[in-house]
Amino acid sequence: MLHYLIAVLDNTLPAATALALLLFLAGRGEGARRAFLLGLLPGLGAALVYAVLKRTTGIAVREYYDLGTLLPSLAAAAALPFIAPGIFRRGGGEIPFAGRLCLALLAASWTAAALPDLLLYPPDFFVSMSSPFNAEFLSLVFGYCLGLLLLLLLVASLRALAGTSPPALPAVLFALCLLLVFVSQGLDLIRILLARGMVPRLSWLMSLALLDTRDIFSFAWLSLACLLALPPLLCGGPHAGANPAQRRKSRAALRGRRRLSVLLLGCVLVCALSLTVLRNQENSEAEISPPLAVSPLDGIIALPLETIDDGNLHRFVYTTRGGVGVRFIVIRKSAAAYGVGLDACDICGPTGYYQRKDEVICKLCDVVMNKSTIGFPGGCNPVPLPFFLAGGALRIRAGDLEAEERRFQ
């Protein structure tokens, strides 16, 4: 449950916060709201196409897709304050075509960047599960839906409070939002360009790429939301109105804004706890034990059965002739059957598996493996590894591990 709750918030919180503020400000300029809404459509379409290709083919490369969202987003974020200053003013009037184009690009690129993971998560719930009517499946779905609900409540309260806040506050917060977008996406762009060898590996670029800024930016986005929630809670004193009825109406409106502020701060608090305390708990549960190094004799790795017949997951590593550590796992499934596979799968790569009680779980996507299916291909199961039993030992050919070297490079 925790994995998908945290993943939804990590991947979607920045875009959700920015889109909520942008939607409000777009309503200040003539034609801007229409441009914003039209921009959502290609963003949704791009995310859907990528998710389908990623799930069904091997041609979808996330880094190239991210480049396609980062470049227009950075360009539009840098240009918007200069070519469409009207959206930062109350009653901003007509927005020029270039300004509306920037709004559409921001809406499209932010949507396209945030949605693919949300679309790819649900199919993972069914991987290696014989039936959806079990506690583990319901736990995964609950975590995913709870993350979406938190985001929807945060966006709805953020959007509503923006309409009742002092006129300059949403504009100031959106300016800070654009700055955050520019810095965080700029760092993402540097990482992709370095990973793909598109720019020289200069020392200062490598230092920027290695910065761990995830928590910094997550709390920066949450801080923007808090700033919008504070005015209704801090304001007080007499309520304006020519008569008691108007004053009662003013007090009722203030109570409504304060309820929205409390709702928004509650969502921020839950998000903050999820991205700190719960993330630490989830990561601590998913610690992978170090593998035991093994060496072949006459091209065969022999594992005595008495060392692996306890029903627990055992992890080993074989170092290839190229110096690459190829990890594999062994677990006894029944009295007469063993599950043997690489510590990697075709979907999640070499992130590995860990054992929780009597369950084997993929560290990356939190999917639970049915122990009886380990050793068979498909879904998030470990890549099967050929073996045979002889002389009281489970034996694996070193050549079969050499052939899988590429998965761990």
Image (cartoon, grey):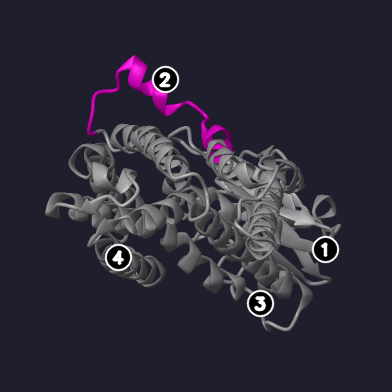
Evaluate if marks 4 and 2 touch, with contact meaning CB atoms under 8 Å apart. Answer: no
Q: Position of residue 37 (x, y in %)?
A: 31, 66
Q: Amino acid at mark 3?
A: Met
Residue 184 in the magenta stretch? The answer is no
| Quarter of the image where the N terminus is located | bottom right
Camera-nearest label, 1 or 3: 3
The residue lying at 76 percent from left, 79 percent from top is: 134
Residue 138 at least partly seen? yes
Evaluate if marks 1 and 3 touch, with contact meaning CB atoms under 8 Å apart. Answer: no
CA neighbours of label 1 inside 10 A, class few (<14), some (14 to 19), many (20+): few
Q: For residue 129, which numbered disc appears in the image?
A: 3
Evaluate if marks 4 and 1 touch, with contact meaning CB atoms under 8 Å apart. Answer: no
Say which residue label 4 marks.
46
The residue lying at 58 percent from left, 53 percent from top is: 9
The relative height of residue 172 versus residue 141 in the rendered view (above or below) is above
Say which residue label 1 marks.
358
Q: Upstream in the sequence, badge 4 or badge 2?
A: 4
The residue lying at 72 percent from left, 74 percent from top is: 138
Q: Amino acid at mark 1?
A: Asp
User: What's the magenta region?
Assistant: 198-219
Q: Upstream in the sequence, badge 3 or badge 4?
A: 4
Say which residue label 2 marks.
207
